[in-house]
Amino acid sequence: MSKLLALDVALLPPPDVRQRAIDLSAALPGDSPDRLRLDAEHIPHVTLTQQFIRIEELEPAFERIDEVLRAERPLTVHVTGGGKSAHSVWMAVERTDVLAGLHERLMEALRGFERPAGTAAAFVDGDARVGDVLWVTGYRLKSSFHHFTPHITLGPGDTPPHIAPFSFEADTVAACHLGRFCTCRRPLRTWTLA
């Protein structure tokens, strides 16, 4: 049986925005050791795709990502404020046509590499919650295309943090091995948008 890996293809914000996200994450209430805290090893990011993939298919998948990104230019990303879902808060990112188009092209390019039946073993150090596995398993159905809601997850919370709107240029895309809380843990390949 082929070993699976939990993969996230994501936009990485520039260092100043990454630090802002890390600071906001650190300021969230609660001190449980079993909660998401962004830092250098839990990388702030805007997810473009998530899936389980066979390890031996990573290189062909990266070639497909190469093809999609070859014509892409740096994106202007607009943070519109704080946002939240049932259990997490985030930096809300405007869903522009350019960002949604990139998401859709990557989803289509990687469709043939998606594998069902991922488990916690597919995550960094085999450490994932049931909810993490279910999230990646259901990403195409529940979080992509018309459900695509770009954001930078900060951590658990009930009240979105106050974030004044701002914009930044994003020129780095990374394919990352996912860890607990579906956070980007280990970049496997990065691309710079020309």
Image: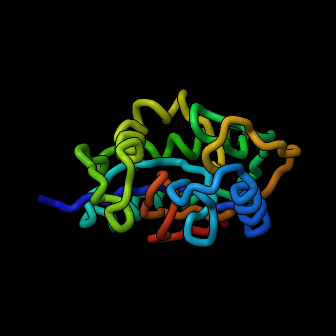
Which residue appears at 78% of the width and 43% of the height?
Answer: 161
Image quadrant in which the N terminus is located: bottom left
**In this picture, is 135 found above or below 147?**
below
In front of the other: 44 or 65: 44
Q: Is residue 145 visible?
A: yes
Which residue appears at 32% of the width and 51% of the height?
Answer: 52
The location of residue 157, given as percent across then percent down, is: 65, 41
Work out which residue is located at the far left of the displayed protein and give it: 1
The location of residue 72, given as percent across then percent down, is: 62, 56
Total labels drawn: 0
User: Which quadrant would residue 92 be assigned to in this image?
Assistant: top right
In front of the other: 47 or 126: 126
User: Which quadrant would residue 57 be assigned to in this image?
Assistant: bottom left
Work out which residue is located at the far front of the displayed protein and give it: 31
The location of residue 27, given as percent across then percent down, is: 75, 56
The location of residue 114, given as percent across then percent down, is: 31, 47
